[in-house]
Image (cartoon, rainbow, N blue to C red):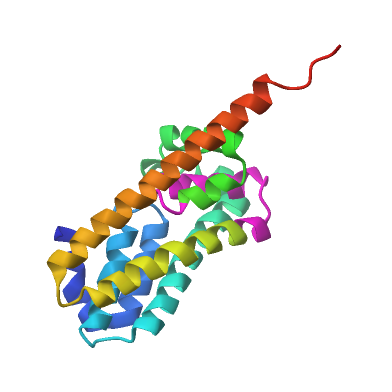
Amino acid sequence: MDVFNALLPIFTEYGYLAVFTMLLICGFGIPVPEDVTLVTGGVIAGLGYADPHTMFAVGMAGVLIGDGMVFAIGRFQGEKVMRWRIFRKVLTPERYASAQGAFEKYGRWVMFVARFLPGLRTPVFFTAGMSRRVSVGTWFLMDGVAALISVPIWVYLGYFGARNWDWMWRMVHSFQYGIFGLLGIGLVVGGVLWWRRRNCGPRAD
């Protein structure tokens, strides 16, 4: 709520530009919740300061461009950027190691999951670019499909809850728990399949 209250007057005054800029910042791992940013964008649309469908388009552009910038930096300047002290505060060695481990287990699907996990999204996209194991097309497909799920949920939830914040925040928390639950099930299933492939390969007669 504190972040929402801080963003609301800024978004109300500066509209789409403020939402787009904040989403770019979110893409670099700055601790501002992306879902709250999108919900707040939806709220100002619900209050009549913006068009909800344009806000959805701005939200898609903001998250994809922000994620794409992280992917591109990893791809073209990864080794250099990793030596920057300020960047290591965002992409800690622990987060980078977690992203590498996730790629080993789940392959390209980790990019789809990462879109819903703020603490993992930046290191995963940076690692995907830096490792050059993921093509631009694959990254865009995985991130784009995930964004088509998450962005409209938050924007339109803010739009329809603009005049009933108690209901809106209850729904936000319900959707968050639901998404995390589904992701947890998917990760467990993926982990089991990965373990079976690794340990139950074809045996020689």
Magenta: main secondary structure: helix
Left or right: 60 in relation to 137? left
Specify the segment rendered in magenta: 115-139
Say above or below: 177 vs 171.
above
**Is residue 181 part of the magenta span, yes or no?**
no
x then y, percent, for residue 16: 34, 80
Seen as rendered, the residue at the extreme top is 205
Total numbered labels: 0
Left or right: 162 in relation to 178? left
* Residue 64 in view of the camera: yes
x then y, percent, for residue 197: 67, 27
Q: Quadrant of residue 45?
A: bottom left
x then y, percent, for residue 91: 42, 42
Residue in the picture at 42% in, 58% down = 27
**Is residue 133 part of the magenta span, yes or no?**
yes
Residue in the picture at 47% in, 34% down = 98
Seen as rendered, the residue at the extreme right is 205
User: 28 and 103: which one is in front?
Assistant: 103
Name the quadrant of the C terminus. Answer: top right
Say above or below: 39 vs 93.
below
Q: Quadrant of residue 195?
A: top right
Residue in the picture at 29% in, 86% down = 50
Residue in the picture at 37% in, 46% down = 180
Left or right: 166 in relation to 82? left
* Residue 87 in view of the camera: no
User: 65 and 191: which one is in front?
Assistant: 191
